[in-house]
Amino acid sequence: MELYSNVRSFQVLQRDVATNTATALLKNGKTRILGVGGPYKIDNAHDVYVGDVWVLAGQSNMRGYGYFDDAICKKYPEPVHAFVSREVWTVVPSDEPIHRLAESPRAVHRQLPDPTVRDPGLANIRGYSLVPAFAHVYKRETGMPVGVIACAHGGTSIDQWLPSHDKDNSLYGAMVNKVWLAGGRIKGVLWYQGESDTPNGTDTIDPTYRTKMDKLLKAMERDFNLPLVVSAQISRTIATTYDATAKHALDEGWHAIRKTQAMFAEDQRHAVVPTITCPLDDFIHVSARGLADIGCWMALGAASILRSRQQVNATKKECGVYQDIGVGIFYPQDHKVMLVDRLVREGYQYMHHLLKIPIGFEIVTTDGSEDVHGFSIHRHTIVAPDGNFVGPSTIVDMIYSARIGADGCSVELMLTSKAYNEIRASLPGNQFQVHYGYGQNPHCNLISKMWGVPLGAARQFSNISIA
């Protein structure tokens, strides 16, 4: 039996999943078993709860850089129990920032650049995060009070998060030590990072990003005793450039990072949440409304992992989060796409030409219309020895309209006659591929009808056949 000693006011004690309790060691040497919930008074500590504790890690979209929005703050008004940057447990009102990096005693948070370190008052204007919505929805879904440990830092790359035992000068070492100071046990990690590892238009994508993420996740498993991980797939950026080469590098880089992040959903302890439909507050930072949505989706992903562990046959994934959510990123990614001829009107020979893409669950658009955005067709020109097409591709204008199919579970891409004939002539083969959410700034609008979570970006379909 693990004991909590030196319990502090506003602390959230991580429950034991087997008993749904936590045990506190009192100053008189006796122990007290506490059930999920609260508030409890433990010796001189007050407003103590038992529930689930989550680490906040990543860069600025996890730290929270949305402009405070009164309507969003009122939608999720509950204060959050947090182990904050100055490394004390407290409650943070929904209209105040969770992270105040300028107050951190750790050297790493002063050494690495972050606008809220240079100007601490900025966090009072731009400091809204996904946490209030996450805590609200997670408690609604699981019944568990939530505590968070603030560890994120803006503008950080995966290299700056690699495992280290230096608790003062490394982000990872500081995170591990903060967890120990905050009570030593957590339920999981909320992770939002990757923007800093995309090309800036002059460099190329780091091919080792997946390897480095694997190393980070394995270290978390070791140091946090196999936690759950809920991560966000990076959203969008608006990089104003007139250089076609630079733009292509940006598009490829953002696509590569999103695609890599999608792969982590194969891990049964890891849920990946798409963010591609979220509004921005500037060229790269998600707005308060978007962050609130992401917080909700992360809570649904976390809750679905917990439910799946309670069900014998709930280990198979459908879409990047578990089947009871049924949204997100497809696994496997490559579904069969059908090239279809369809009569415009019975008795007439004029045909519509289209690609029909199965989604697998009911979808709607963010504005409720039938018009779908976010798909593109790419053409490869390099032929490998096995006859398949490889290497760089070019986006080809072939789609004049896109809509949700009559079944509500598919998308129909309407093709020009020339496009239809070119794709048909290329079959069988993979010269043409369909992408959803490609590039640095795609306009995507598909969401799950049941849950409202976006379809994941960076999906590609190369298995095209004739209906």
Image: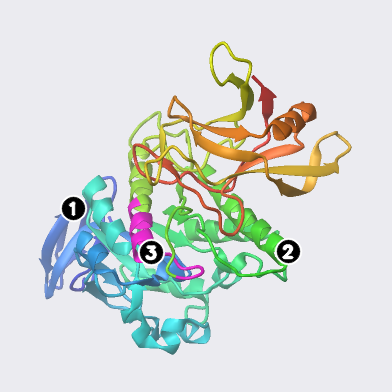
Residue pictured at 75% horizontal, 64% vertical: 245
How far across and down, in percent of the image, does residue 303 sit? Answer: 33, 46
Instruction: Give the distance between the C-alpha atoms of the residues marked 3 and 1, in whole angstroms.
Output: 19 Å
Report helix, strand or loop for mark 3.
strand
Residue pictured at 79% horizontal, 48% vertical: 391
Q: Which residue is mark 3?
A: 55
For the magenta stretch, what is the residue range?
A: 282-296
Instruction: Give the distance between the C-alpha atoms of the residues marked 3 and 2, in whole angstroms.
Output: 40 Å
Quarter of the image with the N terminus in it = bottom left
Of labels 3 and 1, earlier in sequence is 1
Instruction: Give the distance between the C-alpha atoms of the residues marked 1 and 2, in whole angstroms.
Output: 56 Å
Report helix, strand or loop for mark 1.
loop
Quick check: is 168 in the magenta stretch? no
Residue pictured at 59% horizontal, 68% vertical: 239
Q: Foreground: 393 or 122?
A: 393
Viewer-side label of 3, 1: 3
Evaluate if marks 3 and 1 touch, with contact meaning CB atoms under 8 Å apart: no
Report helix, strand or loop for mark 2.
helix
In the picture, the disc for residue 36 is 1
Which amino acid, mark 1? Val
Left or right of 7? Residue 263 is right
Tell how many labels: 3
Left or right of 72? Residue 162 is right
Q: Quadrant of residue 214?
A: bottom right
Can residue 206 be seen?
no
Can residue 175 be seen?
yes
Q: Which residue is mark 2?
A: 244
